[in-house]
Image: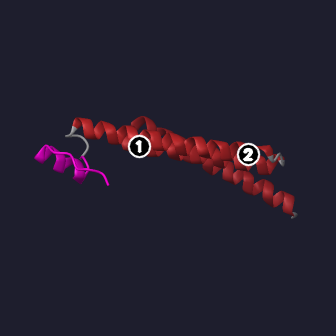
Amino acid sequence: MDAQTIISAAAAIALLLMCAAFFLTAFRVVRGPTLPDRIVALDMLVAIAIGFIAVVAIRTGFNLYIDIAIALGLVGFLATVAFARFVMRQGMEAGEEGEAPAEGRKREKTGKRRKRR
């Protein structure tokens, strides 16, 4: 058994496991009981896609795929931050669904704004 055979078998097993993870995570995106669950599942889908790209890069030996995976990681991170800000803003506006930060609750009770230093 040579190294190329072992790498090929490991890549095939990794692709199979990532396919299973992809479908389970896609189910969570569709079924997720809350919006934060769906956002975390979307972030996980990005991580799985990066894994797919990395395994394909190893199997083909084409190193440009690694750059694509890095770019996808950056875009996925920015999307997760944007979704988190959306959920935070939505929770602060609704008041009942999401709990506002402690500083925001104090302002609501007193009606005064704190000065920033």
Residue 5: image location, x then y, percent: 84, 58
Q: How many marks?
A: 2
- Residue closest to the far right: 2
Using the image, tell me which numbered label, if any, was put on residue 84.
1
Residue 33 can be seen in this image: no
Residue appearing at x 20%, y 46% in the figure = 113
Residue 104: image location, x then y, percent: 22, 47
- Residue closest to the far left: 110
Tell me which amino acid carries mark 2: Asp
Residue 84: image location, x then y, percent: 41, 43
Q: Quadrant of the N terminus?
A: bottom right
Q: In terms of sequence position, does the residue under pointer 1 or pointer 2 come before the other?
A: 2
Q: Find the distance from the CA under tag 1 to the CA under tag 2.
A: 26 Å
For mark 1, does the 10 Å Cα neighbourhood hold few (<14), some (14 to 19), or many (20 or more) residues?
Answer: some
Give the secondary structure at mark 2: helix
- Residue situated in front as seen by the camera: 51 or 98: 98
**Magenta stretch bounds:** 100-117
Give yes or no for residue 108 being in the magenta stretch. yes
For mark 2, does the 10 Å Cα neighbourhood hold few (<14), some (14 to 19), or many (20 or more) residues?
Answer: few
Would you say 50 lies left or right of 7 here? left
Residue appearing at x 43%, y 35% in the figure = 30
